[in-house]
Amino acid sequence: MEIFDKKGNELILIYDPVQEKDPEVGTNFLVFDSVTQRGLLVFIIEQNLVNVPGILEELVRTVGFGKVVTTTHVPPELGTYLIDVKNMKFARAKIIKEINLNKDNPDKSKITNWTGWIPTRNVQIKKLDDKTLIPWLEFSNKYLMTVGVTRIDKHPFKVNAGYFQGILLVVGKKGSGKSHLVKIITLEICDHGGKFLIFDINNEYASLGKDPAGKPNKYYNCILNFTPGDDLKFTLEYVGLPVFTQILFLTGIDETRPQYGSFRSIWLELENAGTLNTTTLRDEIQTRLVQSGQSISQNIGHALLRRLKLIFDTGLFTDHPASAVRLEKEFKNIKKGGAIVINLKGTEKLVRDIVVRTMLEKVSKILEDPKAEPLFLLAEESQLYFEERVFENLITRMRHLGLYQIYVTNTPTALRDIVIRQTDNIFLFRLSSENDVRHLIAAIRLDREAIFALTNSLPFRTCLAIGTCTNEYPFLVEPRELDVLASGKTRLLFPDYKEIDDEEEDEYDEDDDDDTKLQA
């Protein structure tokens, strides 16, 4: 293998596939200058055939005269050489890091970011196995999580759970293995004492507490599952006036609107009297409608009652505190690591709005206590229930309070720019859309060409992992098996045709609630 050319941060390596094994995409090589004891760590992103002068002419001649009997007089050695030249290949290799090699103790070799230095063509080029590379990258041995194995060498891929204390993206086509990987990461973090709030759009995470046979596993008592309207209900007092008015008026709150003023005064009067519940709230509005001299008009009163009926018909509210959920209490019930899973599968937009707003508000209150433990938020297809201002609050405020976030999606273009820019780690599965890849470039510490080349060649169930957890070095990873009950699969009429790992629902149609909004 020889260096042919350098273009930007890319080396073109020429090799003879007859004499050398093809360097598969994802293979690492050390390009080492023995004189200076310096080298480059490069990562193969693509293979191609060498195009030298005369190759096209030779191919055309071969195809054009395929049916003509010809006699050539070429010495055997030259004939072999010409065949070898025609089959020569080159590999595109991205320069990732630079190394100063310690000959006496290779494990002490110093890895740095590439400074722009390149060696001469008189270098040694050899495959670098992951067993040698990983110690050079100085991964921390604390809080280790076994995610899977590297694709080429099948070396255990272990990362420090501490590096997930930020923003993690898991992105890829439907069925590529995203949710499987996220389940691994979730349970590994739980093993280290982490606690999760999971918004489960496809009812996949409820089974984390069961083994493949459906029996309780070691996580059974620390995975708490809730279904809105069933075992997930709130009291009005717990939800609170600010969150409830956001839901009631749908859009931003305008405190000058007469609807808001009238509703607020009724709520506060009942709350101060200790009689606030769904029944007394509706009764008080109805009473003021029929009494003269009250500060509520017929239009406002009827609009409030119609909207309250829609909200209370969701089944999310109860007047009995014993049957209501309090997030603070549920997290305390998880003694070590674990998760609270909110099943949003099949829920209407209004239900998702109420649940998400309430949960995030309560998480925020919990984390405002300096003594509170940080939490993890796992959101699949977050664009279905997070608005722009929710993302801004999560990324700019709640992240600093200690809410670490994992976003999973098969629609990368739906991710807000603020999430992309703040990403610390990304696990990228196969993508075929250029728009999807282009949208993620800011989150990946590789250039555009490398990302396009890699995402088009990734096998299913294999991901590109890069970020603080890998010291910004790219790895192709095959997630390990997971010993939990499978769930979230698509129901099939013809099950023998194809097994589909349906990780995410298609985007829901948003309900048209315009006719239920309160009019000024």
Image: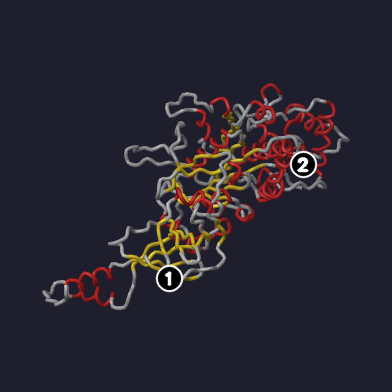
Q: Which residue is mark 1?
A: 121
Which-is-in-front pick, marks 2 and 1?
Answer: 1
Number of numbered discs on residues: 2
State whether residue 38 is above or below residue 77. Answer: above
Nearer the observer, 253 or 407: 407
Q: Residue 360 placed where, x, y %?
A: 68, 39
Q: Residue 276 placed where, x, y %?
A: 78, 28
The residue located at (50%, 52%) in the rendering is: 105
Q: Residues within 10 Å of mark 2 (few under 14, many from 20)?
A: few
Q: Residue furthest right?
A: 293
- Does label 2 or label 1 sit earlier along the sequence? 1
Return the mark for residue 299: 2
Mark 2 and mark 1: span between their CA atoms? 83 Å
In the drawing, does residue 354 fall left or right of residue 237?
left
Quadrant placement of the N terminus: bottom left
Q: Is residue 306 visible?
A: no
Q: Residue 505 placed where, x, y %?
A: 50, 43
Nearer the observer, 209 or 496: 209
In the drawing, does residue 365 fall left or right of residue 511?
right
- Say which element carries label 2: helix
State whether residue 439 is above or below residue 484. Answer: below
Q: Residues within 10 Å of mark 1 (few under 14, many from 20)?
A: few
- Say which element carries label 1: loop
State whether residue 100 is above or below residue 339. Answer: below
Q: Amino acid at mark 1?
A: Arg
The residue located at (46%, 31%) in the rendering is: 484
The residue located at (51%, 70%) in the rendering is: 8
Query: Contact, CB < 8 Å: mark 2 with mark 1?
Result: no
Q: Is residue 474 visible?
A: yes
Q: Amino acid at mark 2?
A: Asn
Q: Residue 340 placed where, x, y %?
A: 60, 32
